[in-house]
Amino acid sequence: MIHVVLHDAKDTVAVAVVEGIEAGTELNAWIMDEDRTISVKALQAIPMGHKVALRDMAVSDTVYKYGIDIGKVVAPIKAGEHAHVHNIKTKRW
């Protein structure tokens, strides 16, 4: 079962495509551009449609989704944690 998807191997977050992801779930992540899977353990519940970090990220790191820069980290994020507005912000403001 695929739990999360990402488009580009350089993406640092993936999007949950199923409901019910709870902390401790071993997530299968499909890299669409390469048609291969990787795995990451969810450290927190991840709502469907939300992002999960694929690697540890520090404050000021760039976040990649769909192969493009979508913002910067404003609070440390561990691989498997929920990545959302509480720890990622746009670089525009």
Image: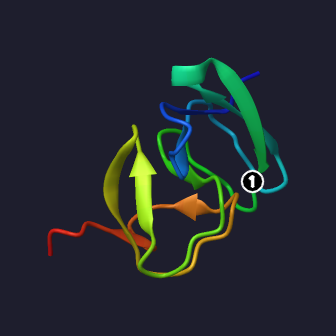
Q: Position of residue 14 (x, y in %)?
A: 55, 43
Depth check, front residue: 62 or 17: 62
Please tell me which residue is depicted at 64% across the width and 53% down the height of the picture: 54
Q: Can residue 32 be seen at all in this image of the molecule?
A: no
- Quadrant assignment for the N terminus: top right
**Among the 4 quarters of the image, the one containing residue 28:** top right
Q: Position of residue 15 (x, y in %)?
A: 52, 40
Give the answer, above or below, for where 35 lies relative to 21. Answer: above
- Of residues 37 and 41, the one nearer the viewer is 37
Q: Position of residue 20 (x, y in %)?
A: 69, 40
The amino acid at mark 1 is Ala
Q: Is residue 92 left or right of residue 86?
A: left
The number of numbered badges drawn on the structure is: 1
Toward which corner of the image does residue 86 lie, by quadrant? bottom left
Q: Residue at x 51, y 61 (%)?
A: 83
Q: Residues within 10 Å of mark 1 (few under 14, many from 20)?
A: many
Is 59 on the left-hand or right-hand side of 17?
A: left
Residue of label 1: 42
Instruction: Residue 13 in the image: state x and y as whole percent.
Output: 53, 50
Q: Which residue: 45% across, 72% down? A: 61
In this rendered view, identify the residue nearer to me: 7 or 1. 7
Residue at x 72% of width, y 28% of height: 37
Q: Residue furthest left?
A: 93
* In this rendering, position of residue 22 left or right of residue 9: right
- Name the image quarter holding the C terminus: bottom left
Q: Is residue 30 visible?
A: yes
69 vs 36: above or below: below
Q: How is the image coloured?
A: rainbow
- Element carrying mark 1: loop
In the picture, measured across the screen, residue 74 lies left or right of residue 58, that is left
